[in-house]
Image (spheres, coloured by chain):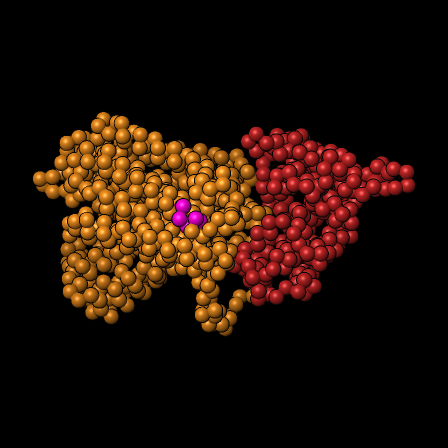
Amino acid sequence: MSEPVINVSELTRRFGATTALDAVTVSLPRGAVYGLVGANGAGKTTLIKHILGLLRAESGSVRVFGLDPVADPVGVLSRIGYLSEENDLPGWMRVDELIRYSRAFYPAWDDAYAEELRQVFALDPAARIRDLSRGQRARAGLLIALAYRPELLVLDEPSSGLDPIVRRDILGAGIRTIADEGRTVLFSSHLLEEVEQVADHVTMIHQGRIVLSAPLDTIRQSHRVGDRVPSLDEIFVAHVGMPAASTLDA
Amino acid sequence: MRSPALVIAWEFATRHRWGFAALAGYLVILGTANLLILEPGQAVNLHGSQDVPAITPRLVATVFVPVSLFTYYFVAVFSFGLTGNMAARESMYPTRMFALPVTNAALTGWPMVYGTATLAGLLLAATRFALWPSGVDVPLIWPALFVAAALAWTQVLMWMPYGLPGLRVVVAVLWLMTLNVPVVTAVDRQISESLMVAALAPQIPLAYLCARFAVAMARRGDVPDWRQNFAWLGRIAAILPRRRTPFASAARAQRWFEWRLHGPSLPVWVGILLPFELAMLFVAGNDTPALVAYTLCGALFTPPFMAAFSVPRVRKASFQESDGYGVTPFVATRPLASAALIAAKLRMSVWSTLAAWLLVLVAIPAALTLSGTWPVVTERARQLGDAVGTPRAVVVTLLGLSALVASTWKQLVQSLYVGLSGREWLIRSSTCVTLTVLIFIEPIVAWIRETSDVRVALWNAMPWILAGLVGAKVSAASWIAARLQSSRLLSDRALVMGAASWLVAVLALYGVLVWLVLGPLIPRYFLMLLAILAVPLARVSGAPLALAWNRHR
């Protein structure tokens, strides 16, 4: 069996009195779409930030491609595509400048693919990022996360607050394309119907703890009541006691 | 809590409880212990003279510094300057408060009432409980009224939407530069208190009306946009060739990014200030050697001075988040080592320094030629040549210029580590310390200059002071080098190369100092200590550690 892309072991993180992650252990083998689901404030973004090396493990360990993302950020980040809900692309850059700047960091950058994505997403190369709509900014972020065909694509609530067409682009052009090429996608969301559409494997996180982690089909079958297969939302409520879209920390 | 007054008071009191607690504590100390901490009965005036001594350092430390710091802090608090984006066109008034079911009058009036009352109260208390008992003869009412009016107008400037990004910064700088004019005029001309009160009292209601207009504009989203008037600049820029070839490396791409983000800041500031400074050469009667030298010195010291205010930092990720100084995910997720990110900043700082100095070196000869003051400069240069010999005069001039350029770059990079740490407490503490030093430095220097015993003691202790500073610097650098090596932020080769470069720079500077100033009164070890202290080491090499601390929290 190949080495897992992500291996998180007994990871605990506290922010003051709040325990954001409590002895979390996750292992993601290569080549599938992993949905990380949980209510707002469950710990999804904290876990993703540890995977990216933006947070240092207080206890436990995080390995991505077998490397420590804090000790070797270049080795890890050069193989990851990342798009977050914040989408903090520099507003002063033009789209073509963003592409030119980003391609310098990734030897595997595919100019033809980047241009294809730019045209599909209808991004004007001369437009400044700050003048783009929120959906267009998300598309620009997706473009620079995909154009070097990363081994691991990490999407942190990428479609939150976006219209259905942009969400379709992210799910279709982003997640499925990467997964179809045998790469790995980690996709966090509290919109469970989205996760249900694309994920092969679902991990539920609640109050910093993993409450369920299994292939989606297995989860469905194990929660089957007679002939009726419950939705992921119903399964989530059964485990957590509230819908994923409710806000714990809003 | 239904009253708008209470809601707004609660907002200020809760968010800034530690500031108010510090103010209350200070006022209690002033009210109860001023006789212990001051020098009662000492006759002091604001000018100082042979008959009447100048303000003492103790008075400065216990009254002027705390009152100044509290004033800066509460001006920022009550104008919402701590939470807004000063460079934005939009009002700095928090938009979340526009959704409150209260009138524009309440949104404007209560922060103004609380702010003016706080600052006026602080000034009245300082005068009544500290300055008067110490014999400092200052008026009671008008300084308090002046500070209140200054706050009210600052609120107007901060809450007003502007037509251009950055315009608020320019207006604020001009405002701060002119703020002391009424005080200086009143003190110099000895204007009566009643006249000053009559001039200042109407300012507050007038400022209230302007602030209310600004808040009403901001609340209905009415932000003027004058950028179309400058669209021709964009068209000119579009004609210029844009670089479309790929970057040769990630490091070059990052250098371009840093330049675009921070690079023009220093040259722009220098470009704004230089014309005003050099305009002095064109004023009739300003062609005396002393005034020309004074003007040129001002122009030459502008880049290093402004560099202290143009230090490239991590930008605020969000003005709404408490973690507003953290490195943004976009930058943090670049596949580039923290040391390479710092290297890009250092290289950008070199370009920024050179661009600023190019402006100075073009503007000064142009101004001297156009104003007809070249002969004054050439005559001074001839005198210097006669005194020390032409080769030495040329070398001294070039060395002085190089020192100013190096000092500009040093100013840009030596505080990098503070901003890059991303820790709000460290950034604010550093700002507070800098402000305190700026306030302290002038009276301390005056005190040393005027007290011969202190001068002698200081001169005798100077080797020990310098040795202590060198010890601290070398210890800090050693600790940082060990951390850089253990955390693998820098390779062993890079560490050795860095140390060797620093040593070469120190030896070169030492050689220059020996050649320039060595004499019977100045021993060689003294010059070596100065050279070690002058070449940046610990703070610059701490920048990668600070960034890594911020990037991997």
- The extreme front residue here reads B2
Prevalent SS, magenta region? helix
Taking the image as shown, residue B408 lies to the left or right of residue B83, namely left
Chain identifier, red in the render:
A
Residue B89: percent from the left, percent from the top?
46, 58
Name the residue: 77% across, 35% down.
A238
Q: Quadrant of residue B382?
A: bottom left
Residue B475 point in image, percent of width and height: 39, 32
Which residue appears at 46% of the width and 51% of the height? B103
In the rendered image of this protein, which colour is used for chain B? orange
Residue B418, percent across and down? Answer: 43, 42
- Residue range corresponding to the magenta coloring: B106-111
**x then y, percent, for residue A171:** 73, 53
Whether the magenta-drawn stretch holds residue A215 is answered as: no
**On the rendered structure, is A37 left or right of B535?**
right
Residue B110 within the magenta-colored segment of the rendering: yes
Residue B151 placement, left or right of B385: right
Residue at point 63%, 64% (across, down) = A123
